Amino acid sequence: MDFDLNTYKKMIYHTQDEEKNENNTTPFYSFDEIYFKTNENLHEYEIDSLKGKKVLTVTSSADHALYAILKGATNIYSFDINRFTKLYSNLKVSMIKALEYQDFITTLMKLKNDNKEDNVFERYIIDKVKNYLSYDEILFWIECDKYFSAIKLPDNFSGAVNKSLFIYDDCDFRYTPYNNSRNYYKLKQNIFDANIKYLDSDIDSLSKKVKNEKFDNIFLSNIMSYVFDKEKFNCILKDMHEILNNDGIIYMFDLIKNATFNNLYNFKNKNDLFNMTNKHTKNEGNLYILKNK
């Protein structure tokens, strides 16, 4: 995966002065934190197979792309406005290729722990994943770990430093595609045939980024619930309709009660594009399923 190493290294540090911050890449200034793992129960999608399907998903924790791979998808487009997510996604993919199940879980927890006394990437990961990461990616993660483990900031540094790239949710893996060793080894077997194409894009620009591509399955996890403007919400769904195959499906998860539903209800009354069903999930969220009429 190609990226500008120096630009990403600079973005690890973020300034307290918003007006002078020249490294903005997201609405959250230098970087948004990455979800360490999914916060929704992916197994409640109840998808039997995605073999031969073209999938579009938010990158986030990479777990939606991994779920698609677990279900047999090999052609995946993964988008996010937060550029760091693609680095984490590619690292996670590399770890699955290289590690046995328990080693994978242990290593993930090492990444999540921000009270490191040793360099995680030098001692835990590099020798195991170096065959699956580019040289620049390895340098980035080493540099990341040094920044977050630093006791003293550089003398000429006057800003602030985020102590981790990750949002610290719980350590419960039951909702993830790798929730048990059986799923993990099926995922590990499938992942060598899968290709993930990463797109630096927000939801507004996505239809332009994918150009003339059409998708069988689109996963919009925790996105539409933050689109509060009704007209913008309608425009995005119309864009999604344009890039969805005739028999395609959009999965829209919402952890914020009724945030998505209210806009969806408004959209359904004004547009005759989708049939919609919704399912209340066990982890208190809602899963909306949209199919072309």
Image (cartoon, rainbow, N blue to C red):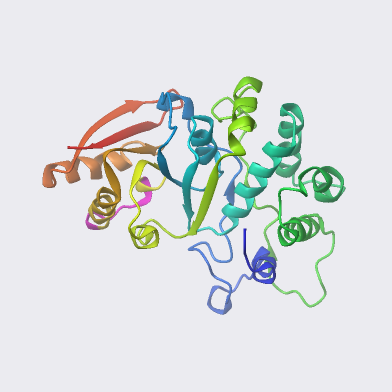
Q: Residue at x 84, y 59 (%)?
A: 151
Q: Which residue is nearer to you in this view: 244 or 287? A: 244
- Residue 236 is left or right of residue 137, and the answer is left
Image quadrant in which the C terminus is located: top left
Q: Where is residue 159 in the image (x, y as percent from the top left)?
A: 68, 71
Residue 115 position within the rendered picture, expressed as x and y whole percent measured from the top left: 79, 46
Near-viewer residue (76 or 225)? 76
Vertical arrangement, residue 213 with respect to residue 57, above or below: below
Residue occupying the point 70% across, 66% down: 9
* 229 drawn magenta: yes
**Looking at the picture, how far across and down is residue 239, in whole percent?**
27, 54
| Rendered location of residue 164, percent (x, y) | 68, 52
Residue 103 visible in the displayed image: yes
Relative horizontal placement of residue 189, taking residue 82 as reference (left or right): right
Which quadrant of the figure contains the N terminus?
Answer: bottom right
Instruction: Please give the name of the residue rendered at 53% of the width and 77% of the height, measured from the top-left corner.
Output: 19
**Residue at the (24%, 56%) spot, across then down:** 235
Tell me: residue 151, above or below residue 285: below
Is 50 left, or right, of 245 in this rendering? right
Relative to 87, is 156 on the left or the right? right
Q: Quadrant of residue 23?
A: bottom right
Q: Magenta stretch: residue 84 in it?
A: no
Q: Is residue 221 at all visible to an observer of this figure?
A: no
Image: magenta residue range: 225-231
- How many numbered marks appear? 0
Up the image or down, 194 lies above or below 49; here it is below
